Image (cartoon, grey):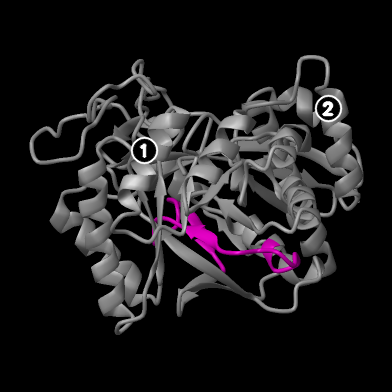
Amino acid sequence: MRITGYRTLRTAQRWGRPVGDANGVFPDGVMPVPIILVDTDEGITGVGMGPHVEADAVFAAIDGQDPRGVVALYDRMLRHTFKAGHAGVVFGTIGAFDTALWDIKAQAAGEPLWRLLGGSDRTVHAYASGLDIALTDDELVAAYEAYGQLGLRAAKLKGGLDIERDRHRLTLVRDVLTHAARGMRPGLMLDANESWTRKQAVRHVCELERTIDLTWIEEPVRRWDADGLAAVSRGVRASVASGENLTGLEQFAPLLAAGGLDIVQTAAVWGVTHFLRVAALAHAHDLPVSPIGNTPVALLHAATSVPNHLASELQDLRAPVGLHLDLHVEDGAFILGDSPGLGIRVDEGVIAAAQDGRSTAPTGPHVRPEQAGRRLLAVSERDGRQPQPHPVDVRQAPAAAETSQVA
């Protein structure tokens, strides 16, 4: 079997409501989902979701190769990009190709990827994550009631701009999930998306912990601040979770050495091989690992094969436009199917019909606000909604953007 070519598509996750975090909001709830399709001479096509940046250069490393040698090909892609560097979206492109190769390998074996990787249980525990900073109280309650009806007993809220607002919203979700679980205490997490300094993080979380039992605080300071993450971990009761934006084991090493991570995270768009290596590194430090992403299908399969998986992020309850996924959610967990490979079917006709030609959004959750980490006072609410530091013009859809990660 040989790799013969690749194609790219762009679809979208359409939430039907505003989504975002402390850095910004997509008011129309349209999030980009880039796709890479890798073709072979035996008619098997693999699907990977992730950026397309430098795709021609990355593909040159695997063109004509046997896709079943996926781990070796992953390292080959890294070697082909080492001079300019493989961080950021280039790492995401490598991850998308890597995921597609794992899909091909499992399809060729006639097995779902979770079984090929050595998993024995198709059940992957999940937590709810609504990208919910722009929701009103009523909208927030309704969103988490839907998660609760599917058995979700843990939730991660977006916050970090106002202590009292965060306390109020966490309390609302706690009450919703407690009711759904008939009195069982839910897990509550807060994601600040790198919006604080070290002191701001400790002050904010300690104040919340006077009345809220937080399971973890996510990305309280900058992703590379090993000493800062360690200081936050020492200063609060909650675990510190981070790592979704780190690209390569070399970026995790200083954080683990400093004791900066209690929950090790990795993003869905960085690929299966990266996740497996991060999980092994975390396991060596006796730490749990947790996948992040709006469509973490590949990492759900991979999570079944590692001993330290904690829970995977469940965002929108609907699949991206034109994608059909062989999985469902039941009793608070993803249940993977038996389709060979990832179990992703791509309807290119539906995706093409859904394109409207609108331009990429220039701002939103992926643009760091000028005042991030330098706010003296809480950001005030506007029009009854949580602040939107970087609003996106609703006439612009990010369907053509080169990233698919808001987590």
Q: Residue at x 75, y 67 (%)?
A: 305
Compare marks 2 and 1 and give the one earlier in the sequence. 2
Q: Position of residue 383 (x, y in %)?
A: 8, 35
**Res 309 quadrant in image:** bottom right
Q: Closer to the camera: disc 2 or disc 1? A: 1
Q: Is residue 336 left or right of residue 180?
A: right
Measured along the vertical axis of the image, is residue 52 above or below residue 180? above
Classify 10 Å Cα crowding around label 1: few (below 14), some (14-19), many (20 and above).
some
Q: Are marks 2 and 1 in contact (CB under 8 Å)?
A: no
Predominant secondary structure, magenta span: loop
How many numbered discs sit on the rendered protein? Answer: 2
Viewer-proximal residue among 305 and 183 = 183
Q: Residue at x 55, y 50 (%)?
A: 292
Measured along the vertical axis of the image, is residue 361 above or below residue 129? above
Q: Give the residue at mark 2.
A: 60
User: Does 248 appear in magenta?
Assistant: no
Q: Position of residue 228 (x, y in %)?
A: 56, 31
Q: Is residue 182 left or right of residue 253?
A: left
Measured along the vertical axis of the image, is residue 303 above or below residue 238? below
**Secondary structure at numbered mark 1:** helix
Q: Which residues are magenta?
A: 303-326
Q: Residue furthest bottom?
A: 182
Q: Amino acid at mark 2?
A: Ala
Q: Position of residue 256 (x, y in %)?
A: 71, 42
User: Does 324 appear in magenta?
Assistant: yes
Q: Residue at x 47, y 54 (%)?
A: 237
Between marks 2 and 1, how big is the CA–CA gap?
49 Å
Q: Give the residue at mark 1.
A: 203
Q: Is residue 263 visible?
A: yes
Classify 10 Å Cα crowding around label 2: few (below 14), some (14-19), many (20 and above).
some
